[in-house]
Image (cartoon, helix red, strand yellow):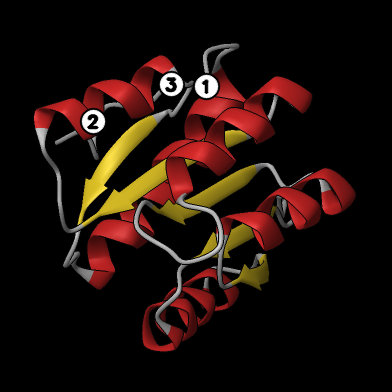
Amino acid sequence: MRRKPMEILIVDDQAGVRYLLEIIVREAGHRAHTAQNGMEAVSLALSIRPQLIFMDVRMPVMGGLEALGKIKAAAPEIDVIIMTAYGSEETVSQAMELGAMCCLAKPFDVNEIKEIILEYMWRKANSSSSGITAASM
């Protein structure tokens, strides 16, 4: 029995990162949507209601933490994984307080993203808890 594809939003100001994640998501059989800043992410997230968002922290226009807060305030059911190359304890702590599911250090491994998606799907299918710990920093 095949599972229904997820809607996954990828938010990063670097086109190469968006492209790589988009390929991974689509190869895993899911629908990928992309945004290049937090403002676009908030708008897209509230219109398409993805199950999962991969979001960078440092972006122009609106950063990932501000966007995370806005998304979780309006749609707390959307799970967000924060990605950052600047993973200070303060950034991770703030992201978790704002409702991030976990934080992922950049650069990341392609297989790590695949594993996160698979674990996320498994946990969603097998429990009411949406939190994952495999990608925590």
Report the amino acid beneath label 3.
Gly
Mark 3 / mark 2, whichever is N-terminal: 2
Is residue 86 rendered to the left or right of residue 132? left
Task: Report the mark closest to the observer, 3 or 2.
Answer: 2
* Mark earlier in primary sequence (1, 2): 2
Residue underneath mark 3 = 131
Is there CB contact under 8 Å for labels 1 and 2? no
Residue 76 visible within the image: no
Give the residue at mark 2.
92
Q: How many marks?
A: 3
Nearest the viewer among 72 and 25 is 72
Q: Residue at 78% of width from left, 26% of height from top?
A: 74
Q: Residue at x 42, y 28 (%)?
A: 101
> Where residue 84 sits in the image (x, y, percent)?
25, 53
Which residue is depicted at the point 82% across and 44% down?
46
Which mark's residue is nearer the viewer, 1 or 2? Answer: 2
- Classify mark 2: helix, strand or loop: helix
Side of 12 relative to 103 (left or right)? right
Distance from the alpha carbon under mark 3 to that under mark 2: 15 Å
